[in-house]
Amino acid sequence: MLIVGIALGLVLGLAAGGKLTNLAYIQMQRLWLLVAAVLLRFVTEILLNLGFPPAELLRLPLLGGAFILLLFALWPNRQYPGISLAFIGVFANTAVIIANGGSMPIWEPSLRLAGLVPADITSAVHYVLPPALDATFLLRLGPLGDVIPMPFPFIQNVASVGDVFLTLGLGFFLFAGVVRVPQQLDERQLAAVRQRLRTTPQRRLRIGDEGAETGLSPALNATVALERPLLLGGPGPRVASPALASYDADDAMADDSFTIIIPLPSLDTVERVRRHPYVRLALNGSFSALWAGQLISLFGDRLNQLAIVAVVAISTGSALATGLVFFAATLPNLVLSPIAGTFVDRWDHKDVMVVSDILRATLVLVLPVAAVTNIILVYPLIFLVTSISVFFRPARVAILPRIVPQEDLLSANSALWVGETMADVLGYPLAGLFVALLASSVPIAFWVDSATYLASAGLLATIVVHGARSKTPNVDKRPSFVAELAAGWRFLRRETVLLANTLQGAAGQFSLGIAIALTPSFVQLTFSQSGFGWQAAYGFLETGIG
């Protein structure tokens, strides 16, 4: 699976016009430690497969140490696109390896869903975990083990959630590395730039005499000072303009002609390479972490939605019970959305997002247990998960201007919207196929969703917020919660366009809610006897609805 992700990242990068030689410009820190950790990991596995007794005796320190070294090697490079995601994947696998004494468990039902049997396991690093969902399963961190079946040709295997994150992270890193050159100036290079700026004399362009022969018309004479004109905020083509005729600087200062001093570029200008806004966003480690975290959790949300609908529909056989799932998920938006933003504005936005993801991961992990105990317990859990999401969304919107430059804010919002669209277009059909494949092993879907929330929390924790929010000097003079809420409503009433959009959206949601609640029952009745899993059909239908 890892090889497929690496190959896909390279192929897509080349297809986008990149070059493999661009990878040579990536200046990773602790590269030697990264290579040593990878070698230790695979050499240990080879020795275990050969039955080398010392390797078996030192299984945990060798494998655990290799993964820990890998974490130390990746951490200082997290500013590169995809590395934060790979770090989360390695961290998840490290926790499982340590919890299992130097082994990676493969859940037996997932192994059989992949079309494999225990005899097919040839690696001494892996062992089969029994299908029972008991305390042992949780203590072994079974949900983070190899639980994702992959019954596909050439990559028939069982993967862990950490493997998925690691594959996506490395694929994205290689794609970005091939497409562009993520080279940053180190201190030695910066010192050389400063020295050159100090020793380079300023150029003077004299206006009013006839000494400067450029070969251009008089109207274009001043343009010779720009060797690389800026086009739409970016550097123009590398074409040299006709050179100014040589002149003596002292003579120029001594005569009576009017002189314009052309300033040297500042160090900030030299350091900042102007690129396409989406490329700049990809190089922004904080935004990349936010975007990747959102995309991962959105995919998990689609998986969770189809899984909970399948559990309730199959367990109760009632269209009403299935419709109540959507009622419980929609109610917080109606009750809490008007006040959530006021609360979030008083809290730290980054902390709100990280804590929200951790809480949602915990609640989603409990969902399958609640469904087995009593299906009624599912509804309050769904209500709580959605309630937390209501606070997450305004925090994400509020933190964006603090991690993205003003000129890239529109592009950043567009990129977030593209991520949501990708989750709808790709997430629903993949989630439907996955849930249909799981059949009675549907708890895996909830574990994967829980892991996506934890991965999102880990990525959001790496965000560096530049520039603090403006705070009221005197807390006593800060408007009360009710006053802020009333001010928001007054603003909405004054803005007729926003008010009309809000009312139309509310009316549309009420009317659309009927179709949303009845869609699972309709799909179940239509496709139950077709031989095609109705869960997969429901996922494809949700893709069409958007």
Image (cartoon, helix red, strand yellow):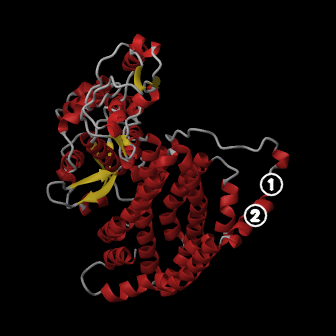
Image height of 70 relative to 403, above or below: above
The residue carrying pointer 1 sits among few (fewer than 14), some (14 to 19) or many (20 or more) residues within 10 Å by Cα, namely few
Residue at left offset 43%, top offset 41%: 284
C-alpha gap between disc 1 and disc 2: 10 Å
Q: Residue furthest top?
A: 250
Circle 2 SS class: helix
In the image, taking residue 3 as reference, residue 170 lies left or right, namely right
Left or right: residue 107 versus residue 138 is left
Q: Is residue 428 left or right of residue 46?
A: right
Between 42 and 540, the residue placed more toward the observer is 540
The quadrant where residue 64 appears: top left
Point out which mark residue 487 bears.
Answer: 2
In this view, the residue in front, 531 or 354, is 354
Residue 261 position within the rendered picture, expressed as x and y whole percent measured from the top left: 46, 24
The residue to which callout 1 is attached is 479
Pointer 1 or 2: first along the chain: 1
Residue 528 visible in rendering: no
Query: Which label was assigned to residue 29?
Result: none
Q: Residue furthest right?
A: 476
Above or below, 528 against 302 in this view is below
Q: Residue at x 43, y 54 (%)?
A: 411
Q: What is the x, y in percent for residue 519?
A: 42, 83
Tell which of 404 and 319 is nearer to you.
Answer: 404
Q: Amino acid at mark 1?
A: Pro
Residue at 16% across, 32% down:
50
Q: Secondary structure at mark 1?
A: loop
Vertical arrangement, residue 76 with respect to residue 323, above or below: above
Q: Residue at x 40, y 15 (%)?
A: 201
